[in-house]
Amino acid sequence: MNAPVDVAIVGAGPSGTVLGAALARAGIEVLILEAARAWHWRAGGVFTSPAAVAALDRAGLPRATVETLTRPIPAMRLETPGGAAVRLTYGADRGGPPAVGFDRSRLDPALEDLAREAGVTVRRGVRVDAVELDPSATATLHLGDEHLRARIVVGADGTASVVARAAGVQRPARLPPRIGLSWHVADPRARDPALPRPLGDARLVVVNDGYVGLAPVPGDRLNIGIVLGPSWRDELARTGAAATSRRVLRLVPHAADDDVAWADAEPCDRISGASPLGGRVTRRAGPGWFLVGDAAGFLDPFTGEGLHRALVSTELAAPAIKAALTRPTGRRSPAAEAGGAYERAMRRRFASKDAVSWLVQTFLARPGTFEYVARRLADRPDVRATMGLVMGDLVPASRALDPRFIAALLAP
Ligand SMILES: Cc1cc2nc3c(=O)[nH]c(=O)nc-3n(C[C@H](O)[C@H](O)[C@H](O)COP(=O)(O)OP(=O)(O)OC[C@H]3O[C@@H](n4cnc5c(N)ncnc54)[C@H](O)[C@@H]3O)c2cc1C
């Protein structure tokens, strides 16, 4: 077997490539292994608050490039079955930058270029079938008949991470099993000048046991993301993803600025599914292994988890991985200490946001309560503004856990 590579990253999604670039810039040898031969659409996120754009700045993606692959979105409109509409602007109405819809067919390759330019070797079309972790030596990655050794192996391979599985830390999300479906459609308003121009808001429409996200992206397209709870499972199995999606989309009410029958819009790619949606891990690092992005835990896109969190996890993991690669001195074990430091940094950064996400999911599971809360958010501009900033990871999430905030939100 060949000499071990310093760091092998499984997965060339945003978290794998951004982490790879950061490590390679620090002079570390990085190999990324990606199962797909070429980029193709997979159910995933396109809508983010401006926090993800700021994280891409920090990752070194030039702002001019980011602008070519995003569409500014003035607000996300949360709509309930009872008719409440909560417009979350993520600070854009107070002079901040807007939320965006990403073109993932350009974002992911741009980040891969960033990694290659930093000196990362990216091997595509290689699925890592299994990983053997050895706390006292190097990890072994099995890619078909090939075996490869790495001093550190990083799982950036999503919620079904092969690295998390090898570490024995994977657990189901603590939510009823949900299914995500996502694809893009052409926006007919772009081609027909007779149709009213859209305002450009994204919509998050809550339906029975699920929700639908509609987000404009570059190229006059709209990304449709549907998340369905267990009560949809039988229908989905019986009628398939296309028929179920059409039925769900017919539940989306027409709006003054959005009167397109999206159920009948021309698809730009095939419907891609994610099931189960989300997952959690009991630990995010250990001797010789780290998890970043969705592999480090992903609850649900409703509360803005996803791309931003994936990017921040790489910022917190990079210094820990660098420290883990330093030689042990005396009784110190940099590898073990670095894993602990990353774990603590992730907890510090996301513990409050996770608590808010749980609170929102608890409301969402009780339609009456959710309706009540949404109506109060719709009527209370300051509370709504804070909630938007918290959901968008733009202020510490602890603000939404402050008893004064909760009282202002829930007061009749
Ligand atoms: C339906 C749905 C809607 C979402 N909506 C949003 C949203 O609106 N906003 C948002 O911010 N986030 C959203 N997300 C989440 C967002 O897509 C993820 O957080 C983001 O893509 C995480 O990036 P990542 O690099 O960690 O993982 P991924 O983007 O999942 O990349 C993982 C990569 O690993 C590769 N891989 C997997 N296994 C192996 C293997 N064994 N060997 C080699 N390669 C492997 C895959 O091919 C893939 O390229 C959504 C997710 C879903 C499922």
Image (cartoon, rainbow, N blue to C red):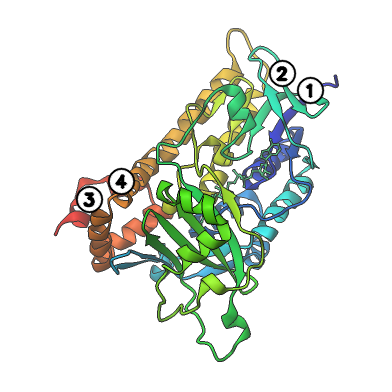
Identify the element where label 3 is drawn: helix
- Asked whether the beta carbons under mark 2 and mark 1 sit within 8 Å of each other, the answer is yes
- Give above or below for 142 relative to 156: above
Specify few, some or many for label 3: CA neighbours under 10 Å numbering under 14, 14-19, or 20 or more. few
Residue 39 vs 67, above or below: the answer is above
Alpha carbons under labels 4 and 3: distance apart:
14 Å
Q: Nearer the viewer, residue 287 or 86?
A: 86
Please tell me whether mark 4 or mark 3 is closer to you in this view.
Answer: 4
- As measured in the structure, the alpha-carbon distance from the residue carrying label 4 to the one carrying label 1 is 46 Å
Q: In which quadrant will I find the C terminus?
A: bottom left
What amino acid is found at the position of numbered circle 2 in the picture? Thr
Residue at the disc numbered 4: 362
Which of 303 and 324 lies nearest the eye of the viewer?
Answer: 303
Ligand 1 closer than 8 Å to label 2 CB: no
Give coordinates of residue 222: x percent, y percent.
Answer: 57, 69
Disc 2/disc 1 C-alpha distance (Å): 7 Å
**Residue under pointer 2:** 138
Mark 3 close to ligand 1, CB under 8 Å: no
Where does residue 333 sit, x and y in percent of width and height? 59, 14
Judge depth for marks 2 and 4 and give the one in front. 4
Residue appearing at x 54%, y 62% in the figure = 243
Q: Residues within 10 Å of mark 1 (few under 14, many from 20)?
A: some
- Pointer 1 residue: 4
User: Tag 2, which secondary structure?
Assistant: loop
Asked if the residues shown at circle 2 and circle 4 are in contact, with their CB atoms under 8 angstroms apart, the answer is: no
Q: Which mark is residue 406?
A: 3
* Along the line of sight, the residue nearer the viewer: 261 or 46: 261
